[in-house]
Image (cartoon, rainbow, N blue to C red):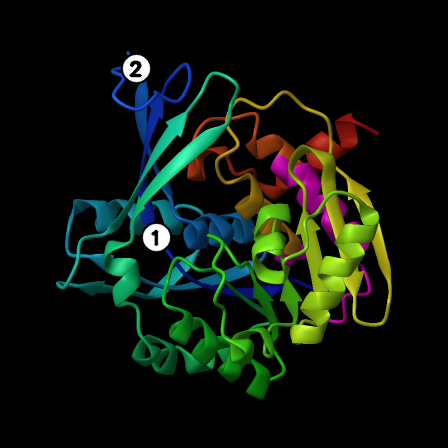
C-alpha cells in the first residue's frame, strides 16, 4: 500500500557557493563554482517522500516572483501535489545561501521570506488533505503556530505526525511536542531540546527518554555518517548503521532521510528499523551528489543501490 504523506514547510531556492574552506573574519577568499537548485527543508522532505514512492502533497508559501515559479516546477516535476502551495505578495520566495567546502561539509544562511507568511489559515484550507494522509511532516523553517495547528488536525484524524526540530530551537511549545508522534532530531538538535549531550548509546537513550516525557511516542536521533538511533515509548530501541560512501555535498541528507522514511514506515512503527535502513540508503545516495533537489534519489535508484550492495 502506498503511503499518503503531507509535508507542510519551507520552499527555498538554494545558491550553492563552492569554497575551499570557510573564510576567517575580514578575509577575502576566492570561490570556485556556484550553482542554483530547489531546496528548503520542507520541500526537500516532500520531494524525498515523493521520489521514494509516497503519494505526496505539499502545503507552503512562495512569493510572486521567478523563484516561486521555479520552486513549483521543481516540485511538480517530482510528482508532488502543490495545490496548497499559495502565493503571497508580502514577501519574496525563501532563499538559502550554502557555503560548501572541499570536504563536502556546508554552512547555510537562510532568508525565510514567504515561508514566514504561512499561517493557520493555510492549515484550515488544507484540512481535508491532512485528514486523508497517513503521515504529516513539518520542520522549524515555518512558524511553530502553523506546525501545531496542522498536527492538531492530524491527531483529530488519526494521522501520524513527524516533527523534524530543525533548525534547532531551544524554546519549543510543550503543546507541539505533545502532538508529535515521531520526533527526528540530529544529535545537536537533540541536545538543544533535552540538554543531553549525545556521545554514546546511554546518552541517546537518556535523550530519547526525555523526549518521550515531553510527549513523543517515537524518537529517531540521526548521527550523520554513523547512522541513526531509534527509541519508542514502549522501550524498543536500537541503532541502524549508515552506509559508507564518499560524501561530496551533505546538503539535504537529513531531509532525504525523513522523506524516504515516511514513504516506507508503517503507522504503527512496526517496521521502524527497516524503514530507517531504507532512509539511510537514500541519504547515502544524496550525499554523493551536488545540490538539494537534484541530489535526492528516486525509488528505482534506491532499490538499485540496495541490490548492488547485497
Quadrant of the image occupied by residue 5: bottom right
Residue 136 visible? The answer is: yes
On-image quarter of the N terminus: bottom right
| Number of residues whose C-alpha sits closer than 10 Å to that of mark 1, classed few (under 14), some (14–19) or many (20 or more) | many
The CA span between labels 2 and 1 is 26 Å
Give the labeled residue for mark 1: 11
Q: Which mark is residue 41?
A: none
Which residue does the numbered mark 2 point to in the structure image? 31
Is residue 79 at least partly visible in the picture? no
Which residue: 33% across, 13% down? 32
Q: Is residue 300 above or below residue 176?
A: above
Residue 232 percent location from the top left of the image? 79, 66
Residue drawn at x 42%, y 52% as measured from the top left: 43
Span shown in magenta: 262-283
Q: Is residue 138 magenta?
A: no
Horizontally, residue 23 falls left or right of residue 285, namely left
Main SS of the magenta part reads helix
Residue 64 lies, in percent from the top left, at 15, 56
Tag 1 or tag 2, which sits nearer the N-term? 1
Residue 2 lies in what quarter of the image?
bottom right
**Residue occupying image coordinates x 58% and y 57%:** 54
* Viewer-closest of 14 and 175: 175
Query: Is residue 285 or residue 172 the one in the foreground?
Result: 172
Give SS at disc 1.
loop
Q: SS for tag 2?
A: loop
* Circle 2 Cα neighbour tier, 10 Å, few/some/many (<14 / 14–19 / ≥20): few
Residue 280 on the magenta span? yes
Instruction: Please identify, in this view, whether the residue under mark 2 or under mark 1 is nearer the observer.
Output: 2
Q: Residue 256 appears at what percent x and percent y?
A: 56, 45
- Measuring from the top left, give residue 46's x and y in whole percent: 48, 54
Q: Quadrant of the C terminus?
A: top right
Amino acid at each position: 500500500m502506498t503511503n499518503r504523506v503531507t509535508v507542510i514547510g519551507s520552499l527555498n531556492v538554494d545558491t550553492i557557493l563552492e569554497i575551499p574552506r570557510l573564510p576567517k573574519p575580514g578575509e577575502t577568499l576566492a570561490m570556485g563554482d556556484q550553482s542554483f537548485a530547489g531546496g528548503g527543508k520542507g520541500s526537500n522532505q516532500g520531494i524525498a517522500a515523493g521520489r521514494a514512492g509516497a503519494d505526496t502533497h505539499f502545503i507552503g508559501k512562495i512569493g510572486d516572483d521567478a523563484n516561486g515559479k521555479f520552486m513549483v516546477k521543481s516540485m511538480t516535476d517530482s510528482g508532488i501535489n502543490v495545490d496548497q502551495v499559495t502565493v503571497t505578495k508580502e514577501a519574496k520566495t525563501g532563499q538559502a545561501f550554502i557555503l560548501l567546502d572541499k570536504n563536502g561539509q556546508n554552512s547555510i544562511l537562510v532568508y525565510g521570506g514567504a515561508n514566514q507568511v504561512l499561517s493557520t489559515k493555510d492549515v484550515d484550507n488544507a484540512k481535508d488533505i491532512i485528514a486523508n494522509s497517513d503521515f504529516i511532516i513539518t520542520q522549524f523553517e515555518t512558524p511553530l503556530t502553523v506546525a501545531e495547528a496542522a498536527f492538531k488536525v492530524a491527531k483529530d484524524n488519526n494521522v501520524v505526525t513527524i516533527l523534524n526540530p530543525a533548525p534547532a530551537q531551544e524554546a519549543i511549545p510543550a503543546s507541539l511536542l505533545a502532538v508529535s508522534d515521531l520526533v527526528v532530531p540530529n544529535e545537536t538538535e537533540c541536545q538543544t531540546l533535552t540538554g543531553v549531550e549525545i556521545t554514546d548509546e546511554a546518552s541517546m537513550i537518556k535523550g530519547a527518554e526525555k523526549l518521550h516525557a515531553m510527549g513523543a511516542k517515537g524518537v529517531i536521533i540521526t548521527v550523520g555518517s554513523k547512522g541513526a538511533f531509534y527509541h519508542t515509548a514502549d522501550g524498543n530501541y536500537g541503532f541502524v548503521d549508515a552506509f559508507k560512501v564518499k560524501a561530496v555535498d551533505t546538503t539535504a541528507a537529513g531531509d532525504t532521510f525523513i522523506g524516504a522514511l515516511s514513504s516506507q514506515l508503517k503507522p504503527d512503527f512496526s517496521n521502524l528499523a527497516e524503514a530507517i535502513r531504507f532512509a539511510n540508503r537514500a541519504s547515502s545516495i544524496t550525499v554523493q551528489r551536488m545540490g538539494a533537489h537534484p541530489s535526492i534519489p528516486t525509488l528505482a535508484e534506491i532499490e538499485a543501490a540496495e541490490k548492488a550492495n547485497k
